[in-house]
Image: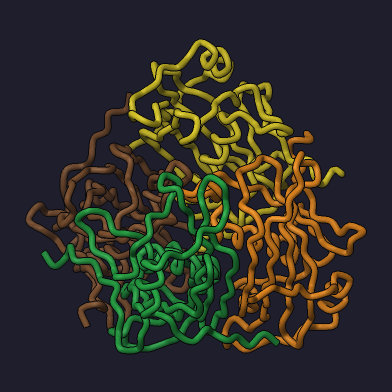
Chain colours: A green, B brown, C yellow, D orange
Amino acid sequence: MSMTIPPLERVLDDGRLHIPIQLRWGDLDAFNHVNNTAMLKLLEEARVRAFWRPAPGETGPATAILDSGLSHGMLTLIARQEIEYLAPVPYQRHPLDIQMWFGKLGGSSIEVCYEVRTDPAAEQHSLYARATTVIVLVEAASGRPVRLTPEMREAWSPLLGEPLVYRRN
Amino acid sequence: MSMTIPPLERVLDDGRLHIPIQLRWGDLDAFNHVNNTAMLKLLEEARVRAFWRPAPGETGPATAILDSGLSHGMLTLIARQEIEYLAPVPYQRHPLDIQMWFGKLGGSSIEVCYEVRTDPAAEQHSLYARATTVIVLVEAASGRPVRLTPEMREAWSPLLGEPLVYRRN
Amino acid sequence: MSMTIPPLERVLDDGRLHIPIQLRWGDLDAFNHVNNTAMLKLLEEARVRAFWRPAPGETGPATAILDSGLSHGMLTLIARQEIEYLAPVPYQRHPLDIQMWFGKLGGSSIEVCYEVRTDPAAEQHSLYARATTVIVLVEAASGRPVRLTPEMREAWSPLLGEPLVYRRN
Amino acid sequence: MSMTIPPLERVLDDGRLHIPIQLRWGDLDAFNHVNNTAMLKLLEEARVRAFWRPAPGETGPATAILDSGLSHGMLTLIARQEIEYLAPVPYQRHPLDIQMWFGKLGGSSIEVCYEVRTDPAAEQHSLYARATTVIVLVEAASGRPVRLTPEMREAWSPLLGEPLVYRRN
């Protein structure tokens, strides 16, 4: 049944990984638009789908090679985040189009860049937000940084692009 | 692009409305499975997709005829909820299959019944939870109950079914 | 500094454990009152403060004797929840007064009963919700129920009271 | 009853507004520490307590002079956020000590700076995070920026301080 086919992550010609994430009405706050922290929740889910190895029977993009978690000995910690909100996001049934690329692959860190946009199938197109997250890979037990392996660099370097620049005042 | 087609709500031969809802890793709690309150968040999103009129350019099921919201003069309040958790829910990429039907259409209330299951396309099938929500339609200004209209009864009666019965002790 | 003294859980003459829980504006939804699932989040926090052993340097009520968590070998799972919403909850700075008692101590389960009320110091007093949660103690590794120990029964039986009865139709 | 006295916001000798915010166990994620987005939820609650006028019967700090909300004609929108996570935050019963000051009062915007720390009464002291939020005051109807009034500048300028500087690579 087509009902059961979830929208898929894919890399398009713009060199970005496009990840469709469903909004929830519960992401709205009392101002009746998506809450500023809910927006970061959407980016978190995009990261999980981009980086974490799919379970048996599931599919994921080529970047999804991490076994992160307390039971796997490695964690992906957030060191820094920056986000610029460009337009209020109303509730909508179409998934948002989270576009992701990497501004930098460091020794044990990754600079993840995002643009959050309306679904390409939506009637009106908007750029809602731009954001950057710096992830650090650490050993779960010691908390010490883990160096990116050649396998990781190979999987992730196709998504290398220009880091986002913010107007900071 | 098929990427942009969200999974659709549809009524299947079992007389239930099936609503695919994406999990988020953020729905997990420190016990590493979907939190008990996150499960109700999924049901909330299923209700929104089942009942609320789609925006221009969007599609929704035949039950989606409500204009609920502070600006529309009518609210859908939750009077009562009951939920039975049958199995811990791990993170998964496939959307969950929220099955919904109505146990009763009252004077100004609806008894919504749900089963939360793995996606039919998943490798292992599970029934995760069963739940009931009693919704009351109220006038936003006065808080007074609003009677179900003939249009509502016509739209919703195809989903009438047996109310869920719970083992309560 | 008095700033640093958090409001404390205490058993009052009504035989109930009173647990002050701060609301957050983020608990509101687009209808501008506390969301139905956020109410259960408040109950979850009340349970944690009621049952879990305080860390060194912290204090907790006499019921707080559990070492729950993946690393302690024992989990407290939610088997069932029921909640009746009696009045919409607006944002307020005073903590809500979550009143807790036990309807039953079973072989390996506890029936927790709650009333959610305005702070006794608030200008207007309201009963917002009544709820019941059935918790089961399980072994983290096997998922098998763990029997309540005599120590647990001794710590919790002072809070035994009448189970809540709900109008269900 | 002392139970009912919530911890209060107050300006200390360091020129910062200290706002005690209770953690919730639900703020933890599957990595068993406070989730990166939950940290921003704590900052949101700190802002609400710092800026919004208390309801009748409530008290608030001298900065709490805003009537924000859809029904008041003025919204406080988030234009930009930046946050640096310095140490994982475990669950704790003591409220966190959110320290707030203003890096800049612009024409219609405020740069809010924060440090998130353990409660001064806690056994171990930690600086968990540093963050900056740029808020813009807008007219709810038009979305147009609203200029800060002399009353606002007078209420907020006592908290003017050095803007946070981040190591950005």
Q: Nearer the viewer, residue D107 or B51?
A: D107
- C28 lies above or below B131: below
User: What x and y, as percent, mark residue A124?
Assistant: 36, 88
Q: Say which residue appears at 76% left-offset and 88% top-offset.
A: D107
User: What x and y, as percent, mark residue D80?
Assistant: 62, 78
Q: Say which residue appears at 34% left-offset and 36% top-offset.
A: C168
Q: Say which residue appears at 89% left-offset and 71% top-offset.
A: D158
* C115 left or right, relative to B115: right
Is the N terminus of chain A in the top left, top right, bottom left or bottom right quadrant? bottom left
- D19 lies above or below A150: above
Q: Nearer the viewer, residue B35 or B14?
A: B35
Q: Say which residue appears at 78% left-offset and 34% top-offset.
A: D1
Q: Quadrant of residue B144?
A: bottom left
User: What x and y, as percent, mark residue C121?
Assistant: 74, 42
* B19 left or right, relative to C124: left
Count of numbered marks = 0
* A42 left or right, relative to B86: right
